[in-house]
Amino acid sequence: MENPKATTVVQLKGITKKFPGVLANDRVDLDINSHEILALLGENGAGKTTLMNVLAGLYNPDGGEILLNGKLVQFHSPRDAIANGIGMVHQHFMLVESLTVAENIILSLQSNALSLNLDRIKKEISGLSKKYQMPVDPDAYIWQLSVGEQQRVEIMRLLYRGADVLILDEPTAVLTPNEATELAAVLRHMANEGKAIIIITHKLNEVMNFSDRVTILRAGQKIASFLTAKTSKEELARKMVGRKVLFHLERSACVPGKAVLKLENVEALNEKGLPALRSISFQVCCGEILGVAGVAGNGQRELAEVISGLRTVKKGKILINGEDVTNCTPLQAIDIGISHIPGDRLGVGLAPNLPISDNLTMKAYRERPITRGFFLDRDQLQVFAKNLIQTFAITPPVPETPARLLSGGNQQRLILAREITANQGVIIAVHPSRGLDVGATESVRKTLFEQREQGTSILLISEDLEEILQISDRIMVLYEGKIMGIAEVADITVDEISLMMAGQPLEKFNHELPADGLKT
């Protein structure tokens, strides 16, 4: 501990947690200090989230003990943990979508009063919102909020309940670079106040920029701990995955072919009935990756959904290989050959209570050899699933495991395996590497490059500018549902992208490729 104010508030000693066929945590020791931001790193499935779920009261450990301010404690539920000042913001939020922000924040709050003073509570929420510079409308319903706004509600809920130890699982995965910087300032402010902050993250740049200390887990074991100032991004990546990681991938130059996916003046509404897409026109060519940049909530999700048949087009046309597919159903989109990697893994991408095998075959179960007449061939289904599990390195490699029990990274691998296998020329990839460790991110990007080399048209929607710049051939920027500009990746700078993300169209980028998809 270099910070003279830092004191150890939580000690995890020999924590062990087992699941059927998996040793998630193997005798892990960890000190958590006040006035400090601790980054917890490791590959997907390394046991980071499981360890923090033990601390947050969601899991009972199979071995080891927890000391809070030097005293032995046992948490039988998250309520026990929060009563002791420990709270967690999970990667998949625990909010009730049909309730308002204020109602979610006070949900399950202990009170002896016969009624709650909602006006006072809303003022208190607004006060916290201003103090930590996290704008939240107390009267908004959760279903109306973007993912980034929902994260603010989760953090606000812990602050409202007086948490002194805050655990955040992948807190920047849903944020733009500017929002991530703002969150870093919020967390630093909390740490300076004396709170202990633990972040589970895969973004090494952010670890280096604003954490004080970093601990690395691999295969459920603690590998190393460093003061952040005395390590490097390369050393952390090597410790995480046990090998050298390529941060910049080599790729061939893009030679776009014919236009495969084309949108003409497309308009659509969001959940609030307000315009989400405003006269959108662009095309993606054979063998090309078109990256879509923008701050969360500017029409990216709606764009992916109108193409994949999940949202109604109010005006305009969507064409695949010249065929009008506007307002096709999701099943028709599958038959047309559109693969969709959604940004919401559990809500849209997976049936979490079904096994891995069923999730992998959701787009193949109607075809031979998995189906024979009106019946499924369960043996062939298992063969199909096991091949994909091996090819895409999904762990645990047990087809019967429910998808909800997989780590976030392995859930993403499951979706990628299904969608890439079903791909017939068009992939809509929304945050494909969100929440993945550096090794898995490298693998996902290589996979997208391979699909591009095979002639697939890829629409990449991401709020990670580094990802957009690394793997896109062209970049399109959205703001309030409008296209601010489209440019070759070599012809645009980060500053120009940032200006367009803030709503300033740049005339020199206001153009499209000609109808045949070839450069002139």
Image (cartoon, rainbow, N blue to C red):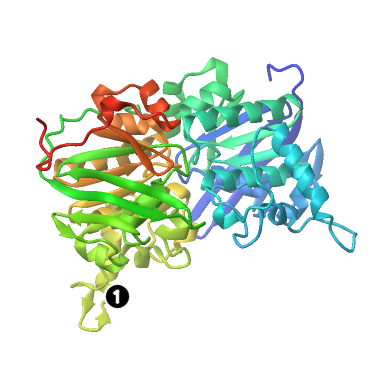
Provide residue 35's location: percent of width, then percent of height: 72, 25
Q: Quadrant of residue 501?
A: top left
- Whether residue 301 sits left or right of residue 370 in the image: it is right
Looking at the picture, tell me which residue is in the foreground, 236 or 28. Answer: 236
Residue 31 point in image, percent of width and height: 68, 32
Q: Circle 1 sits in a helix, a strand or a loop, which is it?
A: helix
Counting from the top left corner in percent of width and height, residue 462 is at: 38, 40
In terms of image quadrants, where is residue 320?
A: bottom left
Position in image of residue 375 (x %, y %): 26, 82
Judge whether residue 279 can be spotted in this image. Answer: yes
The residue at the far bottom in this view is 374
Residue at x-position 79% and y-position 43%: 124
Q: Relative to 369, is 331 on the left or the right?
A: right
- The quadrant in which residue 414 appears is bottom left
Identify whether 453 is placed above or below 186. below
- For image coordinates 71% across by 30% down, the residue present is 190
Say what amino acid the circle numbered 1 marks. Answer: Arg
Location of the C terminus by quadrant is top left
Q: Which residue is mark 1?
A: 378
Q: Around disc 1, counting alpha carbons within 10 Å, would you say few (fewer than 14), some (14 to 19), or many (20 or more)?
A: few
Give 356 or 268, whichever is nearer the viewer. 268
Q: How many marks?
A: 1
Viewer-nearest residue: 265 or 52: 265
Tell me what residue is drawn at x 47 percent, y 46 percent. 45
- Front-most of residues 483 and 403: 483
Up/down of 3 relative to 292, above or below: above
Q: Quadrant of the N terminus?
A: top right
Whether residue 295 is situated above or below residue 302 in the rendered picture? above
Question: Is residue 242 something one can see in this rendering?
Answer: no
